[in-house]
Amino acid sequence: MRLIQRFGRIDRIGSTHDKVFGLNFLPELGIEKHLGLRERLQRRIAEIQETIGEDSAILDPTEQVNEEAMYAIYDSQPANLDLFEPDEPMGIGEAEGILRQLRAENPAEFERIASLRDGIRSGMDSLHPGIFVLCQAGDFQQLFFVDSQGTIETRDASTILGRLKCTLSTPTVSLSHDYNRTIMKVYEQFADEVAHRKTSLEHSTSQSVGQRYVSQELKAFVATLEEEDRRLADVAILQRVYNSNSLTAAVQTELRRIRNHKLTGDALFSRLRSIYDQHRLSQQAEQTRSEREVTVPRIICSEFLR
């Protein structure tokens, strides 16, 4: 009651201060053992509860005394005190600032971190138990914070970064026994989202009239070929290239001419091969192949918060 009154006196409405700090001083460990503060506190709260009854309990069931937090100062590892500070959201700008500072002050360490393999994982104690996962597919990245069952709690970047913030002295902890199962559940959900995004993008991107004509006629041409026909591999490359959304205006003009002249079969195949070589579309084929490869979902890193 004294603590509540004390903080109420200094944190008043109309204060010009953005933050108000209240500091409590505890006796040294040896003195505390003689005073028995922990036992006295527990006994005193129990007496109050008995006196005023459960209906008017001074503590809600969700507001029970956190003894670990109150007596963390006696811990042999002072860094553990950070666990009992409320997590504050961290903006992307602040996170980028930390990385820029690291790159400037310790470039070797920055490069070591930047070159870490995919799937790196760790663990630490936290006030918010759960698992953090960063997934990526191409340019699409997604942060997840899930519970032990893999149920998504939040995707908010600032909230997650705030929970991940720690110091160099923060000790690591072992991963939970079902860690991999939870991670794979998140990965599968992310993979579904990537597939959905890809499908939506493909449907939302309209092809030119020439592209649609070429695509249709190449399918008809494939149907006329035998399984051992060597041209099947070439047709597959042509289909991929001419279905691309990044064809130049010159190539699009050539495709319109093909449609206007109603080229089909071998004549169509020969003309498309000629355009392929003339406009050096082999580079386009390589780019398209690379784009397909980088869209494969992968887990960049994850962390277990105990």
Image: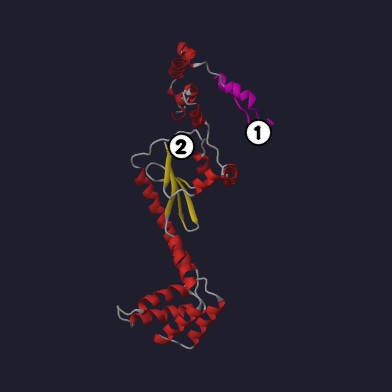
**Disc 1 packing (10 Å; few <14; some 14–19; many ≥20):** few
Q: x, y percentage for residue 94?
A: 59, 43
Across and down, in percent, residue 200 comes to 46, 64
Which residue lies under the disc numbered 2?
Answer: 128
| Residue 12 belongs to magenta span | yes
Residue located 45% across and 30% down the image = 62
Residue sitting farthest toward the top: 34
Say which of 177 and 36 sits in front.
Answer: 177
Distance Cα–Cα, label 1 vs label 2? 26 Å
User: Is disc 2 placed on a helix, strand or loop?
Assistant: loop
Res 102 quadrant in image: top right
Viewer-proximal residue among 73 and 115 = 115
Name the residue furthest front.
108
Is residue 24 positioned above or below 175 on the image? above
Q: Main secondary structure of the magenta part?
A: loop
Relative vertical location of residue 265 with respect to residue 16 in this rendering, above or below: below
Q: Locate residue 247, reporting x and y percent.
A: 52, 74
> From the image, which quarter does the C terminus lie in?
top left
The magenta-colored residue range is: 1-23
Amino acid at circle 1: Asp
Q: Is label 1 in a helix, a strand or a loop? A: loop
- The three-letter code of the residue at mark 2 reads His
- Location of the N terminus by quadrant is top right
| Residue indicated by mark 1 | 18
Mark 2 nearby-residue class (10 Å; few <14, some 14–19, many ≥20): some
